[in-house]
Amino acid sequence: MAQPRILILGAPGAGKGTQSARITEEFGVDHITTGDALRNNKEMDISDMDTEYDTPGEYMDQGELVPDEVVNAIVDEALSQANGFVLDGYPRNLEQAEELEDMTDLDVVLYLDVDEEELVHRLTGRRMDPETGDIYHLEYNPPTDPEVEDRLVQRDDDTEETVRERLSVFQENTEPVIEHYEAQGDLERIDGERAPDDVWEDVKSTIESAA
Ligand code: AP5
């Protein structure tokens, strides 16, 4: 296979970012993540798009989806520059899935399956190193260096209240996307509730067998 075109789906906290980092390293593809792209543009003025709020950040901090028009443009631009990719955070509704079909073909669609209470636990315990972007978990994956520990930050949308809202947005908008790929026979369901190394074994072999 040329550089693989991989879609990774999963609820908030399912481990998409964690596994995407390994995919990028192993397969040499770009990591296209709408969440990071939007976090880097939280204050962008979108008031001319006739949207409810004036910036992406206002949607994100409440756990709501940023309007499709904004996100579709980000993904289209990133895909046009990528030579193989893992796409993480998109599509999040059926309209975005339709847009994606016009933008690119996919070699493999992965779905990380994790129970809801585990998702809440993972997200409320998640911390990030602002210097390196590395992701940790206070219980599952704490940093060993005390200097790193001291500078860890929590994402604004990882409070329990916002996490619950994000999960309900996922159920309403993104579960139909998963059913859509499943109905097409394209979905590779992976038990994401195991340790990251065990999840990675399945992720890696599934991508390799799509070659
Ligand atoms: P986004 O940044 O995409 O967030 P998300 O989908 O909610 O996913 P997360 O990044 O929170 O979780 P993850 O699955 O990557 O988990 P991680 O690997 O970090 O989106 C944020 C917001 O942006 C949205 O709410 C929305 O407003 C907006 N947005 C983004 N895309 C959009 C779109 N297409 N359309 C409209 N709006 C959009 O892991 C989580 C934690 O668990 C970590 O602490 C990690 O260490 C730990 N962990 C990971 N794997 C394991 C494991 N196997 N066992 C134990 N712990 C683990």
Image: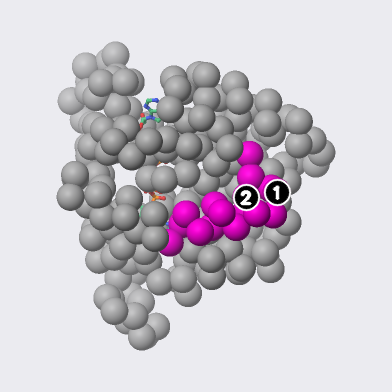
Range of the magenta residues?
173-188
Decide if ligand 1 comes within 8 Å of the CB at mark 2.
Answer: no
Q: In terms of image quarters, where does ligand 1 lie? A: top left
> Is 61 placed above or below 139 here?
below
> Please, what secondary structure does the residue beneath circle 1 have?
loop
133 part of magenta stretch: no
Q: Label for residue 142?
A: none
Q: Main secondary structure of the magenta part?
A: helix
Q: Nearer the viewer, residue 39 or 115?
A: 115
Percent across and percent down for residue 32 are 54, 50
Is residue 134 visible to the viewer in this orientation of the structure? yes
Say which quadrant the C terminus sits in: top right
Seen in the image, is 207 located left or right of residue 113? right
> Is 51 placed above or below 41 here?
below
The three-letter amino acid code for the residue at tag 2 is Glu
> Is 16 placed above or below 145 here?
below
Seen in the image, is 81 located left or right of residue 118? right
The three-letter amino acid code for the residue at tag 1 is Gly
- Say which residue appears at 44% left-offset and 20% top-offset: 195
Seen in the image, is 191 located left or right of residue 151? right
- Say which residue appears at 29% left-offset and 79% top-offset: 52
